[in-house]
Structure formats: structure tokens, C-alpha cells
Amino acid sequence: MNVIIIEDEKPAARRLSRMLAELDIEVNTMLHSVEESINWFQNNQHPDLIFLDIQLSDGLSFEIFEEIEVKSAIIFTTAYDEYALKAFKLNSIDYLLKPIDEDELKVAVDKFKENQPKQTDLQVNIDDIRKLLINPIDRKFKKRFTIKIGQHIKIIHVDEIECFYSENKATYIQTNSNRNYLIDNSLEHWQEQLDPEQFFRVNRTFIVHINAIKDIVSYTNSRLQLKLHSYDADEIIVSRERVKDFKNWID
């Protein structure tokens, strides 16, 4: 199988290559920008499969397809699931949310091997996802949560929420009044429904509200530690793979 990775963060690209090697898949090439990718596709045989980051150092990776008719299957590697999740599902294009999980990677690769997408459908799918990413108009995000407490139902507005977190396979809301509440469904489920201008998934365990951040501290291995106004039960660390996107989010 001929496989390439297009990813602007070289440590993330190397990590993905190592993970694929453990699945007996050798990565032939790693590219790091739109311009480099276009030049490569113009001079090389197109691979069977591309692992493609959406946001590259010199633009969105969709710009590659404006110049080149890519004849390859694609698995997106992205931190932009808040925009693209529904489009990926509708178009049956697979994606991996950063930081990439080993089990999810194996599932995506097995899916590709079993059901290689028809190349004639590829451009339509990419166009649909591109439109949703660049112009997410009229998207409606969740405004409030209802929590059952005994015989009562409490309404919590999203502006009252400091963070969402998972613990022992359960999901919780932490409010700015220093209360936490158990809620149904996973972080992945709620992340899809939250306004990405207000909320950011900093790692596998936490989604934080922009107004909840009291301090940001440099941490080991190029990571960041967040201090929130009320939540202090655990350290909240922005994973290394998400630091760049986090900095763009808060800017």
C-alpha cells in the first residue's frame, strides 16, 4: 500500500508514521504544506491513501485540490471536528481527531481496506466538507442544558459552564459557581453541539469555555497548563498536538 502523510506539524507527522508502522503500513512520504504537496503531486504517482491535515502552515489543504485532481483515498486528521463532523458522517469520508488514538487509527485503516471509496465520488465529498468548514452559516449550537436533580430539573446556560470533563467513563459539567453535574453522553457527543468560538477541546478529558480561563502557564514538552476560575480538581493540560490550534483559538 502506497501511503503519504500531509501534516504541517512534523512531530505529529512522525508520531502518525510510527503508529502506522505498528499496523505494518509504511509511509512513503511526509509533506508539510500546500505548496510542497502540489509540487509533489505534479511529479509523483498518486498514493493509495492520504492522511491529510486540514489546516496546513500556508493555508487549508483543500487548496491542493484546486490545483490537482487527487486520485487517492483520504483520511482526514483534524482538530476541526466542531465544523466537519456532520459532513464527514454524511459523506462517509473517514477522519481522525487529534491527538490520534491508536484504536481509532486501526478502525479507520481497516475501513479503508474493506471499503475503498470510489474515486469518482471523492471531489464531491471534499467540496461539501470544504463549504462547511469555510462557511459554517446558520449552524445552531446548544444554548442550555437541563439537569435532573432529584424531583427537580435545573437549567444551566452555556455561559455558566466552565468546562466539560470525563471521569471514570462518565461526563460532567463544571459551572462557574463551582458545582459539577453528571450529564448523559460523551465529550465527543457534546463537542459537536458546542459553539467552537466559546469552547475548545484541550485534550481527551476536557472541553473548556474561553471565559473560564484564568491563567495559561508553559508546561513540559511544549504543552500548556490552564488555570480555571473555579475548577481545580485536576491539572488541565493542553496536549502538545493541540497547542497550535489552542493559541489560534484564544487569539
Image: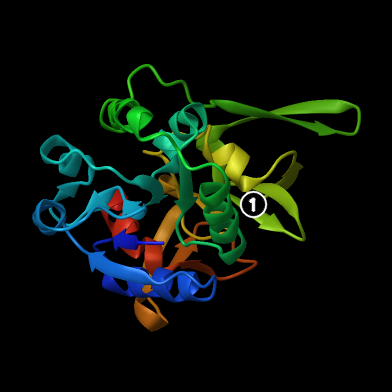
Residue that lies at the very extreme toward the bottom in this rendered image: 220
* Rendered position, 86 above or below 232: above
Q: Is residue 245 left or right of residue 188?
A: left
Residue nearest the observer in this picture, 24 or 67: 24
Residue nearest the observer in this picture, 147 or 4: 4
Whether residue 72 is visible here, answered yes or no, is: yes
Q: Quadrant of residue 165?
A: bottom right
Q: Residue at left 44%, top 42%?
A: 81
Q: Is residue 173 left or right of residue 124?
A: right
* Rendered position, 20 above or below 168: below
Q: How many neighbours does mark 1 have within 10 angstroms: few (below 14), some (14-19), or many (20 or more)?
A: few
Q: Position of residue 32 (x, y in %)?
A: 20, 63
Whether residue 251 is visible here, answered yes or no, is: no
Q: Residue at left 73%, top 44%?
A: 181
Q: Position of residue 40 (x, y in %)?
A: 13, 58
Residue that lies at the very extreme toward the top in this rendered image: 138
- Which color scheme is applied? rainbow
Question: What residue did someone put label 1 on?
Answer: 178
The count of marks equals: 1
Q: Position of residue 118 (x, y in %)?
A: 41, 34
Residue nearest the observer in this picture, 101 or 1: 1
Question: What is the quadrant of the N terminus in the image?
Answer: bottom left
Q: Position of residue 188 (x, y in %)?
A: 59, 44
Q: Residue at left 24%, top 62%?
A: 8
Residue that lies at the very extreme toward the right in this rendered image: 151
Residue nearest the observer in this picture, 168 or 111: 111
Q: Tell me the kind of residue under disc 1.
A: Asn
Q: Residue at left 38%, top 61%?
A: 242
Q: Is residue 166 left or right of residue 139?
A: right
